[in-house]
Amino acid sequence: MEGMNITHASFVTLPVADQDRALAFYTDVLGFEVRADRQVGPARWLQVAPEGARTVFTLSGPGMGDFVPGSAQGIMLVTADVDADCAKLAAAGVEVNGPEDAPWGRMAGFRDPDGNGLMLLTEKEGF
C-alpha cells in the first residue's frame, strides 16, 4: 500500500466550558494569536495558535459536539526555553509540574482553566 497524502494536522480540539475565559488564557497567558472568531450557526468557531504555527487550536465550547471540557490531554508545545516559560506561567498563577529532564529534552506540564493537559518541551539537540 502506498503512503497517504496527509501533509499536517489542521487543528486540535480543546473542549472548554467558557470560550471567553479560554480565549483570555490562550492569548494573554500563552501569547497565542486569534486565527478565527466567528459565529457558525448557533456556535462560535474560535481558533488560536502560536504565531507562525501551521496547526491551530479550536476552543470548542458548549454546543460544538459531545466534547467534555478538560478531556484533551498530552498536548505537546515546543518552546525554545522551557524554564523561562514555566516561570512566566507561574507568575500568571498557573500551576506547573516541572520542568524536568527527559531523554528527548526538558519538559513541564500544566493545565488550562478547563483542565486540558498541556506540556512544554525544549527539545534535546539531535534527538
Image (cartoon, helix red, strand yellow):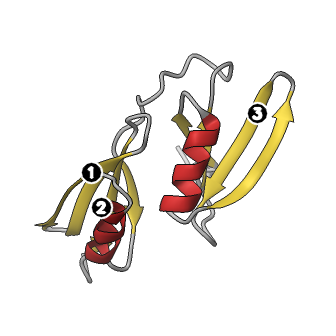
Near mark 1 (Cα within 10 A), the count class, few <14, some 14-19 or many ≥20, is some
Label at residue 95: 1
**The residue under label 3 is which amino acid type?**
Arg
* Mark toward the start of the polypeptide (3 vs 1): 3
Q: Is residue 48 above or below residue 18?
A: below
Q: Which mark is residue 52?
A: none
Residue 51 visible in this rendered orientation of the protein? yes
Residue kind at label 1, given as amino acid type = Glu
Judging by the rendered image, the residue that carries numbered circle 2 is 90
Sequence order check: which comes first, mark 2 or mark 3? 3
Residue 115 vertical position relative to residue 6 in the rendered view, above or below: above
Q: Which residue is mark 3?
A: 44
Number of numbered markers: 3
Q: Position of residue 23 (x, y in %)?
A: 61, 47
Residue 60 in which image quadrant: top right
* Three-letter code for the amino acid on which mark 2 is drawn: Ala
Q: Nearer the viewer, mark 3 or mark 1?
A: 1
In terms of image quadrants, where is residue 18? top right
Kindly indicate whether the residue at mark 1 contacts the one at mark 2 (C-beta within 8 angstroms): yes
Q: Residue at x 57, y 16 (%)?
A: 66
> Label 2, label 1: how many angstroms apart (C-alpha)?
6 Å
Q: Position of residue 4 (x, y in %)?
A: 59, 48
Q: Secondary structure at mark 2?
A: helix
Q: CA distance from mark 3 to mark 1?
A: 28 Å
Q: Is 59 in front, or is 92?
A: 92
Q: Dividing the picture into quarters, in which one does residue 86 lie? A: bottom left
User: Residue at coordinates 31% horizontally, 50% vertically from top-left?
Assistant: 110
